[in-house]
Amino acid sequence: MCEIIEKGVLKDIAYYVKKLKMSDLPQILALQQAVVNSLPDQETLQPLTIEEFQYILQGNGLMIGVFVDEQLIAFRALLIPELDDQGLGKDIGLVDEADLKRVLYQEISNVHPDFRGYGLQKKMAQIIMKKIDASRFDYVLATVMPYNIPSMKDKFYQGMYIAALKEKYGGKLRYIFAKPLHKELQLEKESVWISMGDIEGQKNLLHNGYVGIAIKEQGNKWFVEFKKALEKRLGQI
């Protein structure tokens, strides 16, 4: 059995967290399917394939899992990506191969429907981000579908920024979130709020050096707060 990373109590339920390994794959796949089946809009989640999970579990990243009575109830993954033309590093302005190799992806995060509302997303984020070897990586990147509000809030909670808005995964629109690990993003004071549905307006702001830093609901609509970065590209921080 892998070393226990953390033990605790969720309200009145005892849990433990451990690093996942290949033998946990059946539980990982079953949990992912349970989460997909519970979604009103399955487009909000990009499930990982068996091969993608195997790639991470074979040493190309890190997966942690939360267990209750030996049942996996939540997991979160970090991925060391392969270098390719679709890489998120290029989307935030990184060009050199040496820089692209220092990028880490925050991959899928699933919580069983029966255990939502326990703060497991935040708990797993805090744990897994502390496990990052900052000597090897400069940026943590992630993709989120517009209007996937829980996932967007999760990324902002971790101090990530919207750095781009592009079509990924065969034409699916995604925000690209970024978190520099060694330098703080410097922003101008003035804010611009724009409807999350105004895709071209957001793309224009991002193209002109703005980053998304927050969201709010107003009149049954969601808006994104943008501020201009003092550097033209996030990759230049």
Image (cartoon, grey):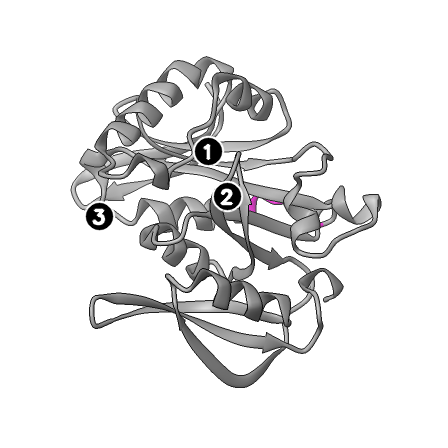
> Quick check: 144 left or right of 80?
left
Please say if 38 is above or below 185.
Answer: above
Quick one: 10 or 197, which is closer to the camera? Answer: 197
Residue 146 seen in the current view? yes
Per the model, the C-alpha gap separating discs 2 and 3 is 19 Å
Residue at 25% across / 42% down in the picture? 9
Which of the two residues, 34 or 226, is positioned nearer the viewer here? Answer: 226
Q: Measured along the vertical axis of the image, is residue 178 above or below residue 29? A: below
Identified by mark 3, the residue type is Gly
Q: Which residue is mark 3?
A: 117
Q: Is residue 18 above or below residue 232?
A: above
Give amino acid for label 1: Ile
What is the crowding at mark 2: few (fewer than 14 residues within 10 Å), some, or many (at least 20)? some
| Figure disc tally | 3
Instruction: Judge from the rendering whether residue 142 lies leftward or rightward of residue 33; answer left or right.
Output: right
Task: Tell me if label 2 and label 3 are in contact, CB under 8 Å.
Answer: no
The residue shown at (22%, 35%) is: 113
Furthest-bottom residue in view? 190
Which of the two discs, 1 and 3, sits closer to the camera? 3
Kindly identify which residue carries mark 2. 128
Q: What residue is rendered at 40% in x and 53% in y?
A: 146
**Which label number is shown at residue 96?**
none
* Magenta region, residue range: 130-134
- Pinpoint residue 40: horizontal percent, then vertical percent: 22, 38
